[in-house]
Image (cartoon, helix red, strand yellow):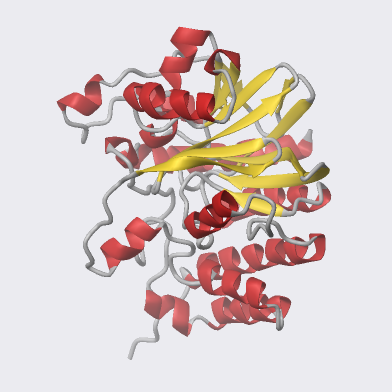
Amino acid sequence: MLKRMAVGIAVAACAAMALQIQVSAQQGRGGRAAAGGTIGNGPGYPTPEQYANSKEAQAHVTKAKAIAGTDAKLMARVENTCGPLGPQRPALERQNAGQAAVPNAPVEPVKILDNLYYFGFNSIGAWAIPTSQGIILIDALNTVKEAEEIIEPALRKVGLNPADVKYVIVGHGHFDHFGGAPYFQQKYGARVAMSNVDWDVIARPNPNANAAQAARPLPKRDVEVTDGQKITVGDTTITLYVTPGHTPGSLAYIIPGKYRGQPLNVLMLSGANITPDKATLAAFEKALDHAREAKARMLINGHPGLFGDELGWMDELRKNPNGPSQFVYTQDQFAKFIDIMKECAASRVVAMDYKAATN
């Protein structure tokens, strides 16, 4: 009970700030919003100078590198996860570097695990989890049209029936994650689940939306996810944790997967690891601790390229479904990856406290 209260307080604190910046990413695919202060690189991020000059931040980076040791796969995660901005979607990295955007393009659906499929675009996607009594869909792309023209055909292509979708669980309240949810809700009667605070976020008009964006339908308010909630369909139970930061109610998932016939738990971070303050950092660390307890061995998210060359890893699986999967870690590796994510997130939070000496 006390843990739930603590998380509730953290969520409420973050919500009060994050609601002020609303849902800028609802304007289309992309966009990244975070709660928190306005110093540094923007809401919730230190400047490169703060990050480099903060002894406390660099101590966390040193710990992360020590955890990775000589493991090249883990050291790549340190390089990706530590830094003043943390993991960045490739589109934002190109934007920050002043490079031209890569055109958004559909990708072929791919089977990641025995019971986990990815489909959508090279920049944003959705996931399907078949169970003994229906399908759990995680996210639903940007619009109803995309749900109809991208998700539904992809489900059929991998041998799944769209009418069997029982739940759409939305990772956070941005249109590129929930925009297609009304399609499955209205056509097939699927339940739509989202954190209770993010239901509030999407209900508020976005003052920056153009006419077409403002006219997009919203899913009807349905399942309000709270921290630690479980959603069960048939033989599969997904556990959800609220990790505010990217939005007030971004979710982390623990998903029971199967890898070549053997159990393999999956961690999904819908809000990446955006932790603009100590409260959001604590909620993030709590979710990671649950992933460790569940002996997770894999990390996914809605934006390929955020935590590695995930589009490349998908291509490898398409070409050789029985070959090695770069998505999968050993249990010891992933436990270390969890500690790396903690250290890197903490490094950004403490770096924002750094102030250069003045004469």
Q: Residue at x 51, y 46 (%)?
A: 271
Front-most of residues 103 and 315: 315
Query: Does the rendering let one see residue 355?
Result: no
Q: Position of residue 263 (x, y in %)?
A: 82, 43
Query: Does the rendering let one see residue 79?
Result: yes
Q: Residue furthest bottom?
A: 359
**Would you place residue 131 above or below residue 357 in this image?**
above
Quarter of the view holding residue 330: bottom right
Q: Residue at x 76, y 50 (%)?
A: 296
Q: Residue at x 65, y 63 (%)?
A: 342
Q: Position of residue 249 (x, y in %)?
A: 53, 36
**Would you place residue 301 above or below residue 310 in this image?**
above
Q: Position of residue 218 (x, y in %)?
A: 37, 19
Quarter of the view holding residue 90: bottom left
Front-most of residues 100 and 281: 100
Q: Position of residue 31 (x, y in %)?
A: 33, 47
Left or right position of 173 against 62:
left
Left or right position of 99 against 270:
left
Front-most of residues 38 and 108: 108
Q: Quadrant of the C terminus?
A: bottom left
Q: Residue furthest left?
A: 211
